Image (cartoon, helix red, strand yellow):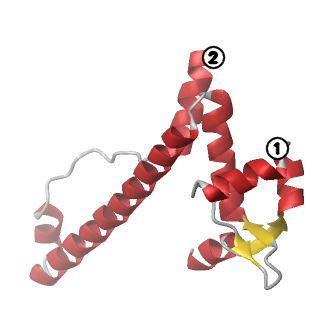
Amino acid sequence: MRNDKKGKKEPLYMIGAVSRMFNIHPQTLRLYEREGLLTPSRTEGKTRLYSQEDIEKLEFILFLTRELGVNLAGVDAILRMKEQMEQMQKQIEYLLEYIQEEIKRRYTGNIEEQRNALMRIPKVEITRLEDYMYNRYKKEEE
């Protein structure tokens, strides 16, 4: 999984290719960079290079602006909240792992006590913000 994440951060696309992919002017990409919405890598010659992660973020930005009519200040706020939610999700996952390990440690050798140490609740499905917004938008269109 970490290799996949690392691969998504590898700079691959030049500004011209990205602008053609999304039918936007290169100045729009530069504006998004000035506003802090995108941060492409730079070569030694200062050429912007966009990673797959940047492309996915750009798709989300364009969805917000084109389909939902969100202005750039709104996009910035949404991206910040999204990042905070992802950080909180990582903290929750870490906490759950810690609790599971602590239960195993405390109830070593007694599987029945391990099973009964926590109350079982239905599993909650966690949805990526982009998927939720896309699906909600599609339902409203229909």
Looking at the image, which residue is at 89% across and 58% down?
16
* Residue 1 vertical placement versus 22 (above, below): below
The amino acid beneath tag 2 is Glu
Looking at the image, which residue is at 23% across and 75% down?
98
Looking at the image, which residue is at 68% across and 41% down?
62
Residues packed near mark 1 inside 10 Å, few (<14), some (14 to 19) or many (20 plus): few
Seen in the image, is 134 located left or right of residue 129? Answer: right
In what element is the residue under mark 2? helix
Residues packed near mark 2 inside 10 Å, few (<14), some (14 to 19) or many (20 plus): few
Quarter of the picture holding the C terminus: top right
Q: Earlier in the sequence, mark 2 or mark 1?
A: 1
Decide if residue 127 is in sight here.
Answer: no
Which residue is nearer to you in this view: 142 or 102?
Answer: 142
**Which quarter of the figure has residue 88?**
bottom left
Instruction: Tell me residue 101's x, y (percent).
Output: 23, 78
Looking at the image, which residue is at 19% across and 71% down?
99
The amino acid beneath tag 1 is Ile
Name the residue beneath numbered marker 1.
Answer: 24
Instruction: Tell me residue 116's x, y (percent).
Output: 12, 61
